Image (spheres, rainbow, N blue to C red):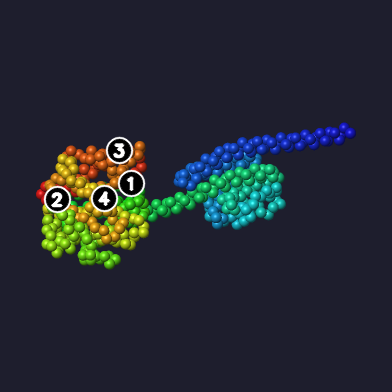
Amino acid sequence: MAKGLWEQILLEEIIKLQQQVTELTIAQTALEAQSQLLAGFVEIARWSNPGQGSPLVQQEILKPFLSEALNLSTTITGAERGSLLLVDQSGQIEDAIFTQDINRQPQKLFRQTLDRGLAGWIYTHRQSVLIPDTEQDERWLKWPDNQYTARSVLGIPILKKNILYGVLTLLHSQPEHFSPAALDVMQATANQMSLVLENVQIYGRLQRYSQSLDAELEKGRQIQINFLPEVIPQWPGWEIATHFQPAYQVAGDFYDVFALPQGHIGLVIADVCDKGVGAALFMGLFRSLMRIFSGQTVLAGLSVQSLEEHELLIEQYVTGAIASDTERRNQNYPVMGLDPEHTLALRAIRLTNDYIALNHGDLGMFATLFFGVLNPNTGELTYVNGGHEPLMVLTPQGEVREELRASGPALGIVPKIPFRMRRTVLAVGEVLLGYTDGVTEARAADDGFFTKAQLLASLPPQIDSAARLLEEIMISVRRHVGDVQQFDDVTMFAVRREGGA
């Protein structure tokens, strides 16, 4: 074989080897750059994962990362310049990122639609584009005020399930700079970017929904707060204090203090089963029913005048006998000092129970509820305890003189069941303390409850203020709970009889 032919063959082999070395070098550079991108993608995907994200994802993490990804893309392909346009589902530009050597104001592109040029073509066709020479391709549009002339262009859609999240464009001033291999590498990179942007968009939608939901819950919280007494009424010779601390934005606990006919005082503390919005809705219903029915009002066909058919039982502390209203009228049964106004108001317990059980029994919602009617002139307290935590009558020395235990079941479970009415008298200096199970079941880090024993241990040796009594109890509860998130609503009231009543 002639010497010249051997030299030509050898030269061709050398050229092929040089091309292979160049391709391997490019591939190694691309692999190293993609490793960096992939590590960043994993991190940004973790931060943008719905349920774990943060409002700072886009501003402090996503945009700087995408800028770094764009710069690495230019390194991988040897591009001189590049841009990344982020678009919404209507094709409008939401944001724009450029390599550092492009002096362009992204805000000029905001809300423009991708309907022309290379980006418009990619948006319409959802395909990558390799333009060897822009002079020969009408899809490339030149910027009138741009001094840079691009001759070779790569355009890659950032695509996921045919949803376009952005367009990546890489430029070079020399024609035929980008190869099909570079296009394949950048397509793989764009696929990784689409995963990140998909997560970010999902998170953004969830965040907007969450913000809207929070706003609605805040409205609900304000409405619920309006259900509670804005100012606790005070009567001469009495101090009434309350504490209300919901575990969430809305609560199932509630208390109420309101005036009744003949100058008497209505006292309510209740705990609706469950938590959240459902419990809060029923809290408003229970509270409204108690107020309406205790004021001799008609609702849904149930009125205090219709109660003769019911058997509201009155427990006599003196004799221990129990008699119905009908028996008492027919037999001239002694009432033992019970005020008829108290009896009338406390019938609200029976009406409320029947209304909830008959109209909403299928929902399984009920409430433990204490309703007491206090005569501020005599200290007489007539009450019904519907399955609630026993209220305590405390002496001025912080000792429990009496517990006002349940005299009937929780309200709203079974209609037309009897509730016993009971009576006690608060002496001067004594305090009526009511609370929900959010106090005794307040959890510490080890899941240990605060317990009733700790509640009793937290009582001060001398009670001279209802407000300070609740403060002392809450100090003990917070000390027990520490930094643990509150699990249940905490509600209390204290009614202290002062001298001169």
Location of residue 382 in the rendering, given as x and y in whole percent from the top left corner? 17, 54
The alpha-carbon separation of the residues under discs 4 and 1 comes to: 15 Å
Dot placed on the residue nearer the N-terminal end, 4 or 2: 4
Q: Mark 4: few, some, or many residues within 10 Å (few <14, many ≥20)?
A: many
Location of residue 247 in the rendering, given as x and y in whole percent from the top left corner? 34, 47
Q: Secondary structure at mark 1?
A: loop
Dot placed on the residue nearer the N-terminal end, 3 or 1: 3
Q: Amino acid at mark 1?
A: Asp
Query: Residue at 27% across / 53% down in the picture?
Result: 409
Q: Secondary structure at mark 4?
A: loop
Q: Secondary structure at mark 2?
A: strand
Location of residue 313 in the rendering, given as x and y in whole percent from the top left corner? 20, 57
Judging depth in this view, the residue of 279 and 174 nearest the camera is: 279
Location of residue 78 in the rendering, given as x and y in whole percent from the top left corner? 65, 40
Q: Amino acid at mark 3?
A: His
Taking the view exactly as shown, the residue that stands out farthest to the bottom is: 301
Residue to which mark 4 is pinned: 388
The alpha-carbon separation of the residues under discs 4 and 3 comes to: 23 Å
Q: Secondary structure at mark 3?
A: helix
Judging depth in this view, the residue of 17 and 210 nearest the camera is: 210
Residue to which mark 2 is pinned: 425
Name the quadrant of the N terminus.
top right
Q: Amino acid at mark 4?
A: His
Question: Nearer the viewer's eye, disc 4 or disc 3?
Answer: 4
Dot placed on the residue nearer the N-terminal end, 4 or 3: 4
Residue to which mark 3 is pinned: 480
The alpha-carbon separation of the residues under discs 4 and 2 comes to: 20 Å
Dot placed on the residue nearer the N-terminal end, 3 or 2: 2
Mark number, residue 488: 1
Judging depth in this view, the residue of 270 and 331 nearest the camera is: 331
Instruction: Mark yes or no: residue 185 visible.
Output: yes
Q: Amino acid at mark 2?
A: Val
